Image (spheres, rainbow, N blue to C red):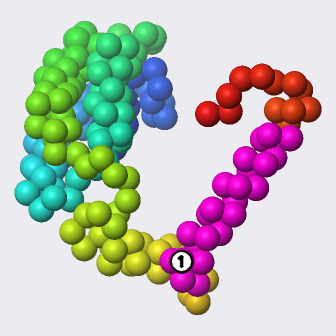
Amino acid sequence: DLIYLMEMGGENSLLSFNSKKDYNNVVQKLSKLEEITNSIIDLLKIGIEKKVVLPKILGDKLYNQFISFKKNKSYKASKINIKLNYDYNKKLEEIIVPQLDKIIFFLKNTYIKHCVTNISLKNLPNGEKMYKNLVSNSLTLKNISIKNIHNYGLKEVNRIQTEMNKIKNHYNFKGSLK
């Protein structure tokens, strides 16, 4: 996850920073970020060529996630309790922002234009085969058909909607549940 890599030096990091070495390790790991970003963009381009792309709704969410990450500067650390011989946050910004700009530009100007409007795997090349493989490798139940899974999903949606309507009526909620 690209954002996780970019975030590892900031406030939301799961890493602990107890020494100069901890900060230097993050900077060293992030030095590979350009290579990782380029690799991701190359793979997305291959996906475009093969017409295996995200649904537009997810492409838009991904784009907005990167925009928000950049705007909020989530990669920055507000508390640096160790004396460093460099500006840690400036270093992170020098490494991360160009890569954010690169991925944001690519998503906006290239990738999202190729995203599909339907969210079904079935509409992608070999999509039905991919879905069957995904189902067979994800379930412990081996004798269940995709049609049965679909019907169970429809039944569950109906059950949940019925339950939500009961709660809505109980509290005299007049708004929409959508």
- Towards the viewer: 6 or 60: 60
The percent coordinates of residue 50 (x first, y second) are 12, 62
Three-letter amino acid code at disc 1? Lys
Q: Write the residue at 58% across / 84% down.
A: 144
Counting other residues with Cα less than 10 Å from the Cα at mark 1, is it few (<14), some (14-19), or many (20 or more)? few
Q: On the image, numbered disc 1 is attached to which residue?
A: 147
The magenta region covers 144-166
At horizontal 11% and vertical 37% (from top left) the residue drawn is: 110
**Quarter where residue 140 is shown:** bottom right
The question of residue 43 being in magenta is answered with no
Indicate the quadrant containing the N terminus: top left, top right, bottom left or bottom right.
Answer: top left
| Residue 50 vertical placement versus 67 (above, below) | below
Can you give x and y, in whole percent of width and height, for residue 82 in the image? 40, 14
Find the residue positioned furthest to the right. Answer: 170
**Residue 158 image point, x, y percent:** 71, 55
Q: Position of residue 164 (x, y in %)?
A: 78, 41
- Helix, strand or loop status at disc 1: helix
Q: Main secondary structure of the magenta part?
A: helix
Magenta run includes residue 161: yes
For this rendering, which residue is in front, 72 or 30? 72
Taking the spot 35% from the left edge, 41% from the top edge, the residue there is 58
The quadrant of the rendering that contains the C terminus is: top right
Up-down relation of residue 51 to residue 37 (above or below): below
Is residue 21 in view? no
